[in-house]
Image: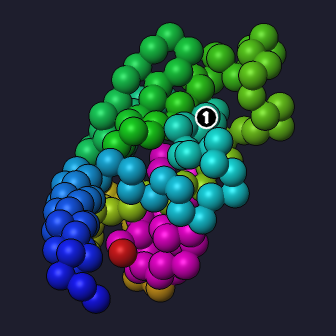
């Protein structure tokens, strides 16, 4: 290699190093925000990027609202639904007068409480989960048990505890 091509290679190597450092910093900053977590990995379709909400009928409105609020969910109450919010997701609980009326057709026609089976990722310690469940009077019906969850394309294993809400829906809390 002559002196000219050696000098010409150095700036390219320096530019490449600068680019890689910048890309690594940008990736680390994005990872720290949590934005894009799980998007694009093990997706069946690039058009479907995440889960938004589910909707199920409820029977015991006051008990359900109090229970989910006590668990730490944000709860919004409307005329036809009550919704519980966590992160960018929510569960819509259709009030009895809505789903029993026969007028509301945007639902599974055979669904009656209890028909929900929900798994929530718990972001704190197992001890804090146990304290929270005890505080709301929820009996752990199974767990702690190892379970394969939905994270990382359905290959990660966590530890789950199962309870029932006042309508009898099954709630799973998984800790990764």
Classify residue 130 by image quadrant: bottom left
The spot of residue 94 in percent (x, y) is 59, 26
Residue 2 in view here = yes
Where disc 1 sits, the SS reads strand
Foreground residue, 81 or 21?
21
The spot of residue 49 in percent (x, y) is 56, 46
Foreground residue, 176 or 22?
22
Is 69 rendered above or below residue 114?
above
Is 71 rendered above or below residue 163?
above
Is 47 rendered above or below residue 59?
below
Is-magenta flag for residue 163? yes
The spot of residue 80 in percent (x, y) is 56, 15
Identify the residue shown where x is 48% and y is 78%.
156
Is-magenta flag for residue 160? yes
Q: Residues within 10 Å of mark 1 (few under 14, many from 20)?
A: some
Identify the residue shown where x is 64% and y is 16%.
97
Q: According to the image, label 1 marks what residue?
A: 55
Looking at the image, residue 86 sits to the left or right of residue 46; the answer is: left
The colour scheme is rainbow
The spot of residue 168 in percent (x, y) is 57, 52
Outermost residue toward the bottom? 1
Classify residue 117 by image quadrant: bottom right
The residue range painted magenta reads 147-175
Identify the residue shown where x is 44% and y is 40%.
89
Foreground residue, 81 or 61?
81
Looking at the image, residue 72 sits to the left or right of residue 79; the answer is: left
Foreground residue, 146 or 17?
17
Identify the residue shown where x is 78% and y is 34%.
108
Quadrant of the snapshot with the N terminus = bottom left
Quadrant of the snapshot with the C terminus = bottom left
């Amino acid at each position: 290699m002559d002196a000219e091509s050696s000098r010409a290679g150095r700036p390219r190597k320096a530019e490449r190093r600068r680019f890689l450092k910048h890309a690594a910093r940008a990736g680390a900053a994005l990872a720290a925000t949590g934005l894009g977590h799980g998007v694009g990995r093990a997706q069946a379709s690039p058009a479907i990027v995440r889960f938004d909400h589910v909707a199920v009928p409820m029977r015991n409105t006051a008990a359900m609202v109090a229970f989910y609020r006590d668990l730490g969910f944000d709860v919004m109450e409307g005329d036809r639904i009550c919704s519980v919010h966590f992160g960018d997701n929510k569960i819509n609980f259709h009030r009895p007068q809505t789903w029993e009326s026969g007028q509301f057709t945007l639902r599974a026609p055979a669904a009656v409480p209890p028909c929900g089976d929900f798994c929530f990722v718990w972001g704190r310690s197992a001890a804090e989960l146990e304290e929270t469940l005890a505080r709301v009077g929820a009996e752990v019906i199974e767990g702690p048990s190892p379970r394969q969850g939905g994270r990382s394309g359905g290959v990660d294993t966590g530890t789950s505890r199962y309870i029932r809400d006042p309508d009898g829906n099954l709630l799973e809390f998984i800790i990764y």
